[in-house]
Image (cartoon, grey):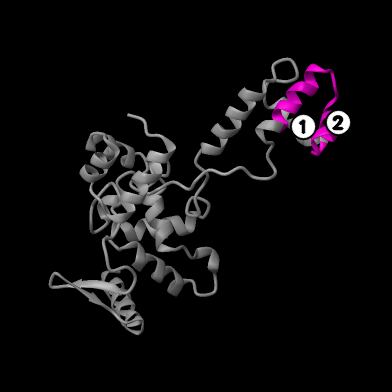
Amino acid sequence: MGFTTEQEDELWIRWRRGESSRLIGRALRCHPSSVRAFLARSGGVRPTPRCRSVRHLTAAEREEVSRGIAAGLSARAIAALIGRSASTVSREIARNGGRDAYRAAAAEAAAWDRGRRPKPSRLASNPAMLADVRGRLEEDWSPEQIAAWLRREHPTDPTRWVSHETIYRTIYLAGRRELGARAARHLRSGRSVRHPRRGGGVGARRSGGALTVVPVGGLAAINEHLLAAGAVRA
């Protein structure tokens, strides 16, 4: 089944809260399998909401372009009416079938479709870093260990740094397969859908089944332990 925008928002809020697909399905009055299928499309990671750049024409401006063409106005005259450059209007008309075929609604739909296409990730645009990350993942390093190792290996080259969150998103987002479709199997969880952490937040960990709050100052020691583990496994 398809979800409305409001239902998608509620689904992501409940998923982030740690609710199961069964509970979410009950709240949205749908079968849990529909929830799981929806989450699987993006690997359990909420895609970044689409937004329109101020450089792109709005739906209202495209309607004005369509009216201008119908009235026989030049691209320069239309541009003056909507406060855009003539080159912007010319490109808009050309990429949407030319003056004879231009339709505002179709042009608007095509613009949103182009915006949905996956953009190259930070890893995809840096082959050397991608190879480093992929190699460490194949040795079953965690994204946190990999991110810390990259900073140690390249302390003066920020172009070779990447956050552990970026690595997670690249693994789980269905549209990004730079690390391989089976990359999630190298994570400790082995899940193909990312599950949110439950309770505790930053600075908390479980010990013997009980939740233990770790002072902020103690996080450094834990990080050192993780780095040491990564060095041993290298």
Secondary structure that dominates the magenta span: helix
Q: Residue 197 at what x, y percent from top left?
A: 28, 60
Q: Nearer the viewer, residue 14 or 134?
A: 14
Q: Quadrant of the C terminus?
A: bottom left
Q: Is 202 inside the magenta-drawn segment?
A: no
Instruction: Name the side, left or right, on which 105 lies relative to 122.
Output: right
Residue 57, image x and y in percent?
Answer: 69, 36
Q: What's the residue type where badge 2 is placed?
A: Arg
Instruction: In the rendered view, tell whether residue 70 sits above or below residue 27.
Output: above
Q: Can residue 180 be seen from the camera position used here? A: no
Q: Residue furthest bottom?
A: 217
**10 Å neighbourhood of mark 1: few (<14), some, or many (≥20)?**
many
Instruction: Write the residue at 49% across / 54% down.
Output: 127
* Mark 2: few/some/many CA within 10 Å (<14, 14-19, 20+): some
Quarter location, residue 62: top right
Q: Position of residue 225 (x, y in %)?
A: 28, 78
- Lower sequence index among marks 2 and 1: 2
Q: Is residue 18 visible?
A: yes
Identify which amino acid the numbered label 1 is placed on: Val
Stretch in magenta: 61-85
Residue to which mark 2 is pinned: 76
Residues at circles 2 and 1 in contact by the CB criterion of under 8 Å: yes
Residue under pointer 1: 89
Give whichever of 67, 36 is nearer the camera: 67
